[in-house]
Image: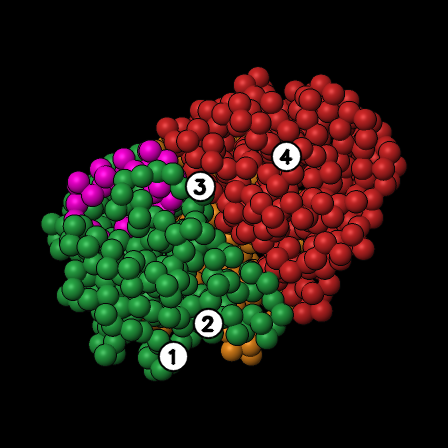
Chain colours: A red, B green, C orange
Amino acid sequence: MLDKVFQNINRINPIVHCITNFVTVNDCANIILACGGSPTMAYDFREVADITSKTNALVLNMGTVSDNDAMITAGRRSNELNHPVIIDPVGVGGSRFRVDTFRQLADSMQFSVIRGNISEIKAIATGKSDIRGVDATEADKITENNVYEIAAMAKQLSIKMKSVIVISGPIDIVANKEIAYLVRNGHPIMAKITGSGCMSTAMLGAFCGGNPDDILEASLASTVTMGVCGELAYEKTAAARGGTMTFRLHLIDQVSLVTPEIICEMMRIEKI
Amino acid sequence: MLDKVFQNINRINPIVHCITNFVTVNDCANIILACGGSPTMAYDFREVADITSKTNALVLNMGTVSDNDAMITAGRRSNELNHPVIIDPVGVGGSRFRVDTFRQLADSMQFSVIRGNISEIKAIATGKSDIRGVDATEADKITENNVYEIAAMAKQLSIKMKSVIVISGPIDIVANKEIAYLVRNGHPIMAKITGSGCMSTAMLGAFCGGNPDDILEASLASTVTMGVCGELAYEKTAAARGGTMTFRLHLIDQVSLVTPEIICEMMRIEKI
Amino acid sequence: MLDKVFQNINRINPIVHCITNFVTVNDCANIILACGGSPTMAYDFREVADITSKTNALVLNMGTVSDNDAMITAGRRSNELNHPVIIDPVGVGGSRFRVDTFRQLADSMQFSVIRGNISEIKAIATGKSDIRGVDATEADKITENNVYEIAAMAKQLSIKMKSVIVISGPIDIVANKEIAYLVRNGHPIMAKITGSGCMSTAMLGAFCGGNPDDILEASLASTVTMGVCGELAYEKTAAARGGTMTFRLHLIDQVSLVTPEIICEMMRIEKI
């Protein structure tokens, strides 16, 4: 069912405009290239409208957010042009400043997809800023016990935000207001490198940029691709007795090597 | 003929001051180290004149350009000291802002080398800003059919800008007003990682910094080194059935491992 | 003797707030994860107090320093909370601006650890700014001939700055006012990649964040870990006939794989 999504990316080679953090920006650029897109990074508010007009999708990542003029300018322009806008509210619950920044962005534009870990998505839903660091807290973690409840919350948030919601974790959730997919792919080692989440978001930019008329399916395909490549990369890493950097190398490598056939064969999704 | 270029780099260990984008800055620093130079990155306009005075070359990269005060201050100081100044007008044709920024830089200083892909170099020659993203467009691409015509254009631009012109692509061109070298090294996979172009520019900084009195030969040697290492890295990547990140690793690895002898043996250059 | 240091890191999983340069920020984040910590990078002065309050340690790195409001705000808040503050005065002797910046930081907060190469540490001790680039100069280099003299200088500086002093080089020095440890681990290839120093500092953040009551031992354990992993990574690199990027990969890999037992077995320290 995801075949068309992959075909569109290969046909269009979507250009993805990223306004992202400088911690993982190189990984984000490389994973966009690996999955068949082309990244362009431009940050000055005087040019972002011009740049984003020529691209297929906009990715906003709050990882090292400061002034948000460029994000707002690019987001509004993308909305005018009906380009998909994907937001990663990194560490949104970590400070009042981030909660406020996210609210300003949300008030200024319509997001096609919001992707975060469960703590970030909860912070958006509640407006609270009591999270330590940028990882999901232990108490919040998605498990088989709470996943259906969280999927229901994701559907509610999708209604409120008029966006597809993607929650990354031990089980990933991809939801719009009616449907939630649970994705049981991926590997725990993904949490031991920086950028797993940011790369997932960047890849959503390429997938949605190539499939602007089917954001839910594009988001599902992107999430499954990341999970499957995480599994394949872990196998390679274990075989080489490698550590976290070997894993990071194989993760992006696999995105550049994997075929739609392998992805569809390995994907473990449940529709609810 | 390039022996002396390599010897000078090893003798001088040129320090290269880079004011570059934050997408590929780490790769740029590592490739400068790999080829025998030493990178120093400083961006605040209050210190760049001080910093650049103590270095051997200045690299300016417009990838994530915003305010250009630091670039102008460092460029002017480098001109006063007769340090080579290398500019990479990343995505210059992508926005009016970038066209203007390039013009301000060009009006403020003399470049020793301008390096870009064919779309960027054409944008400089014409002042147009109709490019999508940061890669060369399909229509512009250098082929055996148009390369002599493009080389002639490069010579003309060299006269106009009083700079050596380096155009990266399937065939690289290194030209001053009288001579153009065509370099038929490299591999298409170089376009599948971010930073191939930026790294080429950073390496030009080290090569020109070690050879300030022979910018054309230094630019040729640097371009050939990148191309040859691209080929060697691809061989290693293919042998390991690796993807794009394996290639990136081997590309910088090979720059740190390759000898002048291997480079001179593998280079495929045509002088016109 | 270092067992407890490692146990505390694994128990606490310290969150390390880094305000660092964008050249090596990705490596810093990954090495913090590799050694058992969790990085968070936030730079806007409007949120750094909020962010840093929820972490276990603060790392300040002057590599691409510009305005220092965020560093000062975060540093003061960390001091109030008795969080360890680690400073890396990258290239401090390279410009008057950096000398002044360091002085402003030092006047605004108390550092738990100052880590630099010998040229940087000398620049702090003397206030001079005559260094070229960001590497230790040849004349300054630590050798068996001058190491005891430098260790004595480190003790003096420790008294003056009320900080543990860590000097990286062919022989590393970890000193407080009374004790200096000489660490004869590591490998010269560490100087051929960017970020060896920055990663050492980032790792100090995790080690001190997990051991706020024993900064000297934590600093020693961190320094030894980096040196031992450098040796192990070099072995892997040589076996694979790899270059500098292969080494970088193995360096962080080894930090994620090495055990306290191996570190204690391989460490070569002298207490003076």
Distance between mark 3 and mark 2 Cα atoms: 28 Å
Direction front: furthest residue: B145
Q: Nearer the viewer, mark 2 or mark 4?
A: 4
Q: Quadrant of residue A231?
A: bottom right
Q: Which residue is mark 2?
A: B231
Residue stretch rendered in magenta on the structure: B85-111
Q: Are marks 4 and 1 in contact (CB under 8 Å)?
A: no
Number of numbered discs on residues = 4
Q: Which residue is under mark 3?
A: B132
Q: Is residue C28 left or right of residue B155?
A: right
Query: Is disc 4 placed on a helix, strand or loop?
Result: loop
Cβ–Cβ under 8 Å for marks 3 and 2:
no
Chain at tag 2: B
Kind of residue at disc 3? Arg
What residue lies at 81% left-to-right and 39% top-to-bottom? A182
Q: Nearer the viewer, mark 4 or mark 1?
A: 4
State the separation of the CA atoms marked 4 and 3.
18 Å
Depth check, front residue: B119 or C243: B119
Residue B14 picture quarter: bottom left
Q: Amino acid at mark 4?
A: Pro
Residue depicted at 59% across the width and 75% down the height: B239
Amino acid type indicated by mark 1: Met
**Foreground residue among C80 and B237:** B237
